[in-house]
Amino acid sequence: MTGQVLDYLALYGVPAAAFLLAIGQFGVPLPTSLALLTIGALAANDDADLFTAFAWALTGATLGDQAGFLAGRFVIRSAGDRRGFLGGLARKAQAAEPRMAKWGISGVFFSRWLLTPLGPAFNIASGVIGLPWPAFSLSALAGECLWVCIYIGLGFTFGSNIEMLAGILGNLSMALVMLTLAAFLGWRLLKAVRKLQKRPNRTRPS
């Protein structure tokens, strides 16, 4: 997969990377981080203008975010009463609405660049629960700007080792996701234990 992606980007250039980013941020499992690193490497080799490459990458990532949000808002949200995959996905997203309401905006921002594997899921969930479109768009755009800057900068600096760098960054991002999930489950467990401890002890009648 990695070799095919690199060949594809080398052949078609920065616009192809933007297309890959768009469908990757929509939810198709593609090496989007590798695409950004490749854009930086192309710019380092004078095969692309750095600012033009940044604009293409940001446009592609933003289009993918918006497509996921709109799919959640107008397709999956209305499927809550249906059976099958779409109905189950809609019900799961609606069940997560209280948590998303607490940290939806910050979750969108951090899932762009720090917890990138969660990005497409946050896009769809944000649309399903009715997160305001302006707030979603601004937080997603801010996060994407940071993500694009970091990865294009790394590709520009370490262009000769982008495959190894992509693997390291991918593993790091997944590790952060797992640590975040573990911390969340630990917090829920601690909250449940404290709730049980606060219950009054009931003595059985003799």
Image (spheres, grey):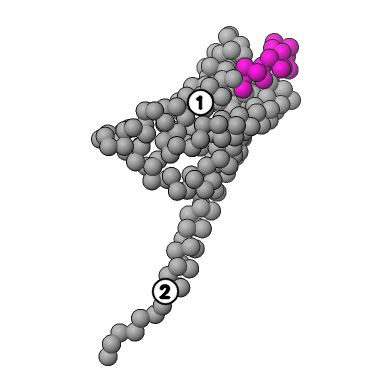
Which disc is residue 40 wearing?
A: none
Label 2's element?
loop
Residue 190 painted magenta: no
Name which quarter of the figure residue 18 lies in.
Answer: top right
Q: Main secondary structure of the magenta part?
A: helix
Residue 92 position within the rendered picture, expressed as x and y whole percent measured from the top left: 37, 42
Going 47% across and 24% down the picture, which residue do you hit?
Answer: 67
The residue at which mark 1 appears reads as 66
Q: Does the magenta segment cover residue 56?
A: yes
Q: CA distance from mark 1 to mark 2?
A: 46 Å
Whether residue 122 is visible here, answered yes or no, is no
User: Quick one: which residue is furthest to the bottom in this view?
Assistant: 206
Disc 2 marks a residue whose amino acid type is Arg
Residue name at image x 47 percent, y 48 percent: 99
Q: 10 Å neighbourhood of mark 2: few (<14), some, or many (≥20)?
A: few
Sequence order check: which comes first, mark 1 or mark 2?
1
Tell me the magenta residue range.
Answer: 43-58
* Left or right, 206 with reference to 47: left
Numbered tag placed on residue 199 in the rendering: 2
Q: Is residue 202 left or right of residue 195?
A: left
* Secondary structure beneath label 1: helix
> Taking 171 as reference, is 10 above or below it?
above
Place of residue 108 in the rendered image (x, y in percent of width and height, measured from the top left): 55, 37
Snapshot quadrant of residue 154: top right
Count of numbered labels shown in the rendering: 2
Q: Amino acid at mark 1?
A: Gln
